[in-house]
Image: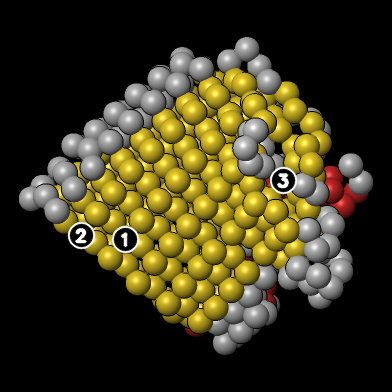
Amino acid sequence: MDEIQKRLFEQIADLHEVPQGAYNFRVNGESAGRNVTEHIDIITKSDKPGIDIIIKPGTKKESVHIPVVISQTGLQECVYNDFYVGEDADVTIVAGCGIHNAGDKKSEHDGIHTFHLAKNARVRYVEKHYGSGEGTGERILNPQTVVYLDEGSTLEMDTVQIEGVDSTVRTTKATVGDRASLVIREKIMTHDNQYAKTDFTVDINGEDSSVDLVSRSVAKGDSKQEFFSNINGNNRCKGHSECDAILMDNGSVAAAPMLTANHLDAALIHEAAIGKIAGDQIIKLMTLGLTEEEAEKQIISGFLK
């Protein structure tokens, strides 16, 4: 790997060296390293680009790293990754994609990730997206996530995109079983003429199951963001959706939540707030010695933390 590729890996996966445990590195559309363990196997798909990650029942305190980087201008790819997490497993999965585009052609990565969590399995999933490069070619990332949660399983998703991506459409579809739990924390920042769309659709089918979705975003410059969420409560369950956004410059944010209760004991809540940074917050920080620009950065950092 060259220095640009190494820097991308640091940004999206906090990797400064080869990690312990299972991993699969992808660089410019090709495999760049793989390791499996006694409990975690990674198999290349035979019918389409991508891999199957198979985590054995009862696997504990192990991790899987599957980052992707693109530093070749004009490269466009679509990858399918399937995660099969066995009963009672408890693991961390670190994904993400970084694109460095120094040319004038579009570079794009579309990743379709499908999670199959067996009974009482638990997964913490971390996904970071990042773009860099002084070229005029677009940097495009379109992640799709499909989730199937069996009885008692839990998936915690932490997704972050805070720099350099010109266009992204982020799609998540989930089916939640009995006593299962889905927790999603999304953080997005756009600037210049960038565009970001988030689209969540969740069917809470299981008894005593729950969904907790929180999206926080900042729209700077002339950027545009759209947030759509559709939560269907089909059993005795709890569902919560929250969209909080800060507007700066000429930024634009649209939020369109939908809640559908198809069961008498479905308890569903949505919260949304869109607006600029309050002037008294900036003034308070400026009295502590910060400039207006430094105060804004401090507020945004805390908001997206």
Residue 44 at what x, y percent from top left?
67, 31
Which residue ends up furthest to the right in the rendered image? 2
Question: From the image, which quarter does the C terminus lie in?
Answer: bottom right
**291 and 96: which is toward the camera:** 96
Q: In which image quadrant can residue 106 be found? A: bottom right
* Residue 148, placed above or below residue 172: above
How packed mark 1 is, by other alpha carbons closer than 10 Å (few <14, some 14-19, many 20 or more), is some
Q: Residue at x 73, y 23 (%)?
A: 35
Q: Residue at x 47, y 77 (%)?
A: 253
Q: Gap in Å between the C-alphas at discs 1 and 3?
A: 29 Å
| Mark toward the start of the polypeptide (2 vs 3) | 3
Residue 302 at what x, y percent from top left?
55, 60
Question: From the image, which quarter does the N terminus lie in?
Answer: top right
Visible residue check, residue 257:
yes
How packed mark 3 is, by other alpha carbons closer than 10 Å (few <14, some 14-19, many 20 or more), is many
Q: Which residue is drawn at 22% across and 47% down?
A: 238
| Mark toward the start of the polypeptide (1 vs 3) | 3
Q: Mark 1 points at which residue?
A: 230
Q: Is mark 2 on a helix, strand or loop?
A: strand
Give the residue type that dot 1 points to: Asn
Q: Mark 3 points at which residue?
A: 68
- CB under 8 Å between callouts 1 and 2? yes
Q: Name the residue under label 2.
A: 260
* Residue 274, placed above or below residue 50: below
Q: Is mark 3 on a helix, strand or loop?
A: strand
Give the residue type that dot 3 points to: Val
* Residue 303, placed above or below residue 155: below
